[in-house]
Image (tube, helix red, strand yellow):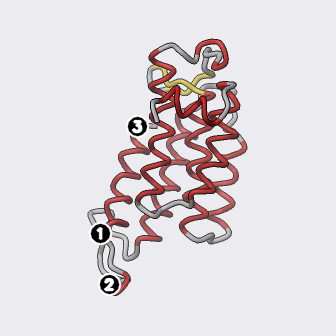
C-alpha cells in the first residue's frame, strides 16, 4: 500500500497544482498529458501492485474488479478515485503485508480496535480519505460510504464513536 500511496501523492500534487486552462501541459515526471491520464496510470499501477503482492492462492477483493471496471469504462476521475479508495480501505483492513506479500490479517477489529497499531492503521486510511476530499479528488459521500462500510462496520462503533476514537 505504501508504494500506491506514494504514487497517489504524486497524482494529488499534480491535481492540486493543475490549472484547467493548461489542460494538455506535461504534468510531471509521470509524462502524462492530463491529470486524468496520470490518475488512470496510478490506478493501473495500484492494481498491478496488489496483483503482484497477493500470496499464493489468494484472490483480490471485489473492489479490485470495481477499479478495473472503472478504468475499462472510462469513468471520470472522481468515480475512479472512489473505487480506488474503496480498494485501499478493503486492502488495508483485510490484508497485512509480510515480507512484501499480502496475507490475510489476523486482527479482529471489534475486539482489537484499541491496540495502537490497529488504531494507527485505521486512522491512516480514514485520514487519507479526508485528504482526498480536501484536494477535490473524491466526493465526500463516497468517502463516507466507504468509511462506514469498510472501516466503521468492522470496528463495531457508531460513526460518532469512531470519530471520537480516532480523535476527530
Q: Which residue is mark 1?
A: 17
Q: Could you say whether the residue bearing mark 1 is in a helix, strand or loop?
A: helix
Please tell me which residue lies in front, 160 or 72. 160
Question: Which labelled disc corresponds to residue 33?
Answer: none
Vertical position of residue 150 compared to residue 118: above or below: below
Question: Which labelled disc corresponds to residue 2?
Answer: 3
Please tell me which residue lies in front, 32 or 21. 21
Question: Where does the image place residue 123, in percent across and percent down from the top left?
Answer: 47, 32
Mark 1 nearby-residue class (10 Å; few <14, some 14–19, many ≥20): few
Mark 3 nearby-residue class (10 Å; few <14, some 14–19, many ≥20): few
Lateral position of residue 42 relative to residue 107, left or right: left
Question: Where does the image place residue 57, in percent across and percent down from the top left?
Answer: 69, 27
Mark 2 nearby-residue class (10 Å; few <14, some 14–19, many ≥20): few
Q: Earlier in the sequence, mark 2 or mark 3?
A: 3
Please report contact status of discs 1 and 3: CB closer than 8 Å, yes or no. no
Vertical position of residue 64 compared to residue 110: above or below: below
Q: Could you say whether the residue bearing mark 3 is in a helix, strand or loop?
A: helix
Residue at 51% x, 39% y is 126
Lateral position of residue 141 relative to residue 98, left or right: right
Q: Earlier in the sequence, mark 1 or mark 3?
A: 3
Please report contact status of discs 2 and 3: CB closer than 8 Å, yes or no. no
Question: Where does the image place residue 141, in percent across and percent down from the top left?
Answer: 63, 56
Q: Which residue is mark 2?
A: 22
Q: CA distance from mark 1 to mark 2?
A: 11 Å
Amino acid at each position: 500500500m505504501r508504494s500506491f500511496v506514494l504514487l497517489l501523492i504524486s497524482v494529488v500534487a499534480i491535481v492540486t497544482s493543475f490549472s484547467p486552462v493548461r489542460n494538455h501541459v506535461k504534468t510531471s515526471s509521470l509524462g502524462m498529458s492530463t491529470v486524468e491520464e496520470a490518475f488512470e496510470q496510478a490506478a493501473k499501477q495500484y492494481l498491478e501492485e496488489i496483483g503482484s503482492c497477493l500470496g499464493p492462492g489468494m484472490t483480490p477483493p471485489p473492489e479490485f474488479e470495481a477499479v478495473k471496471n472503472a478504468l475499462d469504462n472510462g469513468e471520470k476521475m472522481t468515480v475512479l478515485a472512489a473505487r480506488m479508495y474503496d480498494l485501499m480501505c478493503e486492502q488495508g483492513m483485510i490484508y497485512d503485508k509480510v515480507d512484501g506479500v499480502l496475507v490475510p490479517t489476523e486482527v479482529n477489529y471489534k475486539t482489537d480496535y484499541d491496540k495502537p497499531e490497529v488504531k494507527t492503521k485505521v486512522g491512516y486510511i480514514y485520514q487519507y480519505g479526508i485528504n482526498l476530499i480536501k484536494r477535490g479528488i473524491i466526493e465526500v459521500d463516497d468517502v463516507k460510504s466507504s468509511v462506514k462500510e469498510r472501516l466503521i462496520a468492522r470496528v463495531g462503533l457508531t460513526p460518532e464513536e469512531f470519530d471520537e476514537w480516532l480523535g476527530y
